[in-house]
Image (tube, grey):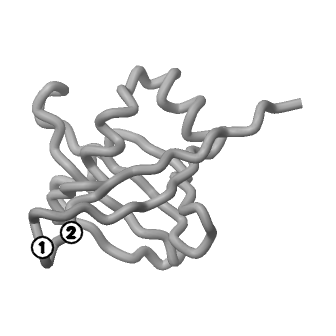
Amino acid sequence: MLAETPIIRYYMEDEKNMESKVQMDFKLSTHTQDMLKEREIPEEWVWRTINKPDWENMGEDNNTHYFKSISEHEGRMLHVVVNPRVSPKKVVTVFFDRRARRQK
């Protein structure tokens, strides 16, 4: 039996008022937790990508796709996929995307 993943209360910067923060609740899927360990990706990079992406888009899968160059990892592009239709929002997967540099 898999352990229940905790809900992470995350405070994102409010784009309209940079002085304030917007509370968002997220949950890391079991798959995401496994991928963070397997791929040795610090969780902090996930939150940095969601909070200040280089760009984001809504995929055909209706998930939000966030992209950010991670300077600590030779500038490689981190791709974080979030399902925004559930509460709390679910981080579905995370990986370094070799194709993302060309897709921007």
Callout 1: helix, strand or loop? Answer: loop
Residue 39: % across, % down: 44, 25
Give the residue displayed 50% in from the left and 57% down from the top: 25
Give the residue displayed 62% in from the left and 45% down from the top: 29
Left or right of 34, for residue 14: left
Residue 94: % across, % down: 44, 44
Q: CA distance from mark 2 to mark 1?
A: 5 Å
With respect to residue 68, does 36 lie above or below?
A: above
Q: Amino acid at mark 2?
A: Asp
Give the residue displayed 22% in from the left and 44% down from the top: 77
| Number of numbered discs visible in the structure rendering | 2
Label of residue 101 in the image: none
Residue 28: % across, % down: 56, 44
Q: Are marks 2 and 1 in contact (CB under 8 Å)?
A: yes
With respect to residue 65, does 91 lie above or below?
A: above
Callout 2: helix, strand or loop? Answer: loop
Residue 41: % across, % down: 38, 27
Give the residue displayed 59% in from the left and 46% down from the top: 7
The one of 26 and 57 positioned closer to us in this rendering: 26
Left or right of 70, for residue 2: right
Label 2 belongs to which residue? 14
Determine crowd level at label 2: few under 14, some 14-19, many 20+ residues with C-alpha closer than 10 A: few
Label 1 belongs to which residue? 17
Left or right of 8, for residue 75: left
With respect to residue 80, does 20 lie above or below?
A: below
Q: Amino acid at mark 1?
A: Asn
Image quarter hosting the C terminus: bottom left
Determine crowd level at label 1: few under 14, some 14-19, many 20+ residues with C-alpha closer than 10 A: few
Check the image and name the residue furthest to the front: 20
Image quarter hosting the N terminus: top right
Check the image and name the residue furthest to the right: 1
